[in-house]
Amino acid sequence: MKTRPLIRPLLATAAWIACTAIPSALHAENEVGFIERFALASDREKALGELVPGSEDYYFFHCLHYQSARNEAKFNEFMGQWRKRFPGENSRRRIIENRQALLAYDANPQQTLDYLKRQLGVTHHHQQEV
């Protein structure tokens, strides 16, 4: 049978994969990602420096930071840049816009309610049954 000579190279390949891939996968599981570093950072501005300028993550986390810090000027600046760089519908930007609408409720409840009605498609076209 000719399959016998193939067993040794296959076993050697499997052993090599086990020795190289598994330790690196275990290391990746223990590595703290950017989201954790950002969330736990005492200086989030410093953590933001890790991001690639102009990337989707760059705009998302900068907007999230300035929104959380209630820095409206910087928030609006980055939102404007984000819209310009990535025009059209964007799910991550929608998350930030939804958060902003909810955070603005105290200052302008009607504007927030109008935004939510528009986004959720809420209509009240029903009539009372008699």
Image (cartoon, rainbow, N blue to C red):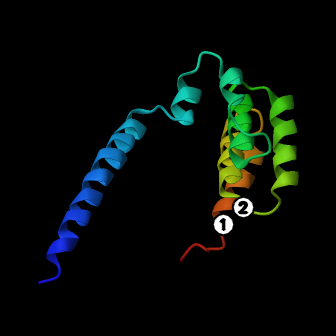
Q: Which mark is residue 69?
A: none
**Identity, as a three-letter code, of the amino acid under mark 1:** Gly
Nearest the viewer among 11 and 84 is 11
- From this view, report whether residue 119 is shown above or below residue 67: below
Q: In the rendered view, would you say 51 is above or below 11?
A: above
Query: Which residue lies at the image location 51% right of the left edge and 31% below the top edge?
Result: 36
Please state, as top left, top right, bottom left or bottom right, where the N terminus lies in the image. Answer: bottom left
Q: Secondary structure at mark 1?
A: loop
In the image, residue 92 sits, relative to residue 51, either above or below, namely below
Q: Is residue 107 left or right of residue 15?
A: right
Residue 72 on image: x %, y %: 82, 30
Residue at x 59% of width, y 28% of height: 38
The x, y position of residue 117, in whole percent, is 68, 59
| Residue for point 82% across, 39% down | 78
Quadrant where the C terminus sits is bottom right
Q: Are marks 1 and 2 in contact (CB under 8 Å)?
A: yes
Q: CA distance from mark 1 to mark 2?
A: 5 Å
What residue is pinned by disc 1? 121
Is residue 120 visible to the viewer in this orientation of the structure? yes
Q: To which quarter of the image does residue 108 belong?
A: top right
To which quarter of the image does residue 37 belong?
Answer: top right
Residue 105 position, x and y percent, is: 70, 38
What residue is shown with label 2?
118
Residue 114 image point, x, y percent: 74, 54
